[in-house]
Image (cartoon, helix red, strand yellow):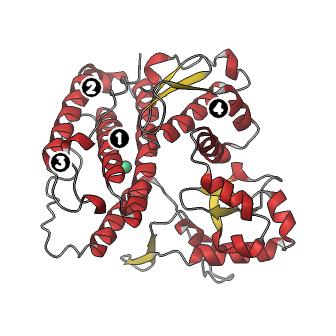
Amino acid sequence: MGWFGRRSHSEVPSWASFFDDERFRAFLTVVEAELVSRGLTYELGDGVVALHGPGVKDGLTLGLQNLAQLCNHEPLAAWSDVVSGHFAGMLGRDAEEAELARRVHDFEAVRPSLRVRLYGEEVAGPERVTWPVADGLTAALVFDLPTAVRTVSAEDAGRWGRSREELYAIGLANALKEPVEVEEVQLEGGGVVQALMGPSFFTSARALSLDVPDDHPYGALVAVQRLLGDELRHVRLCAEVSGWLGGLDDLDVDLSDVGPPPGGEPPAARALLLVARELVVAEAESLAALRAFRDAATEPAVRAALQLLVADEALHVVVGRRLLPLLARTLPRSQTGPTLARLDDLMEADRRELRAAYLAAARGGPGRALGASLEPRDLRWSRPAPRPRVA
Ligand SMILES: [Fe+2]
């Protein structure tokens, strides 16, 4: 279950007293995203979390204080690495980390996995290999591992005896090899918008190789965004996987029903509805289905593609759960009141409808190993998290 229904917004428990409210909430967000991405349900106790779900002993209880302390000594941007590494170790999926630790002394062995990745400025610090990019933006040297991205420590890089310039050049060159699609939109009256889209975490590193002449009168405006970008790359990824399996030519893809639901609500109520229904409910239900497809698929490339979707969607669910109470608290109640009164019923109806649709589509059939079919028994839903308390 989610933690929002259970705790007030101004209480940091004594086991995490070194956090302020904001950092404590961020810590829970990162932990929650990690557990959701692993398909686990969880209950928060006093400084502990009890886990249920695939691959763990039911009710396995892990302490959170050490993890919180570890995070407290790291910049916020590194927390997902720290949390992911912690649970990988605790849950016995640390083979990847162990393999990296074994090879990290050998520069030529790790060189192909080095990338430069764009982060917020919080990641900058002497313990990592980073470069300032612009206000609020930092580039960091990372390892691109099969299921995770890890920042390179200054200690590791120090052993390699390579200059910062050389590491940057290698990391950026590797990042720029990731596939990317460029779309150009001619603006009326002159000017071009260039959209770069790609399935990789390193697509945004393209912003580091902009070819803008120094004497250009206006420079370039660069924007990087994530959530809608995630959804676009999911579509591309799925299309690509379909291509491996024979293409889309024989399929009749019906998108007529896709889009935000119609409604004549005031803007604030509409924002609340979209977050509640699209992010909190629809993303969570699609996450359950994606996990089922991932677990059923045995073909490694398809499984890896589905794991990518699962990790992104878990983050979207958590973003929705964070956003909903914030909107409910801050948007004018005069606009949102009637919507709030019926929100639980709407969300429950959506949830039921989506689950029925997923179940109806899970009819078995060929292609299970390739992520093409499910059986009803594959679909297991956790109890829905209670709607975040907003009063
Ligand atoms: Fe999503």
Q: Along the polypeptide, which appears first: circle 3 or circle 1?
A: 1
Report x, y in % for residue 364: 16, 52
Mark closest to the chain's N terminus, 3 or 4: 4
Identify residue type, mark 1. Answer: Leu
Residue 155 location (% of width, % of height)? 84, 57
Precedes in sequence: disc 1 or disc 2: 1
Residue picked out by circle 4: 23
Q: Give neighbour class at mark 3: few <14, some 14-19, many 20+ (Cα, 10 Å).
A: some
Instruction: Identify residue type, mark 2.
Output: Leu
First in sequence: mark 3 vs mark 2 = 2
Q: Which residue is mark 2?
A: 343
**Which residue has dot 1 on it?**
279
Is mark 3 in CB contact (under 8 Å) with mark 4?
no
Q: Is residue 63 above or below residue 101?
A: above
Q: Where is mark 3, residue-wise?
A: 362
| Residue 190 picture quarter | bottom left
Q: Nearer the viewer, mark 1 or mark 2?
A: 1
Instruction: Indicate the secondary structure of the residue bearing disc 3.
Output: loop
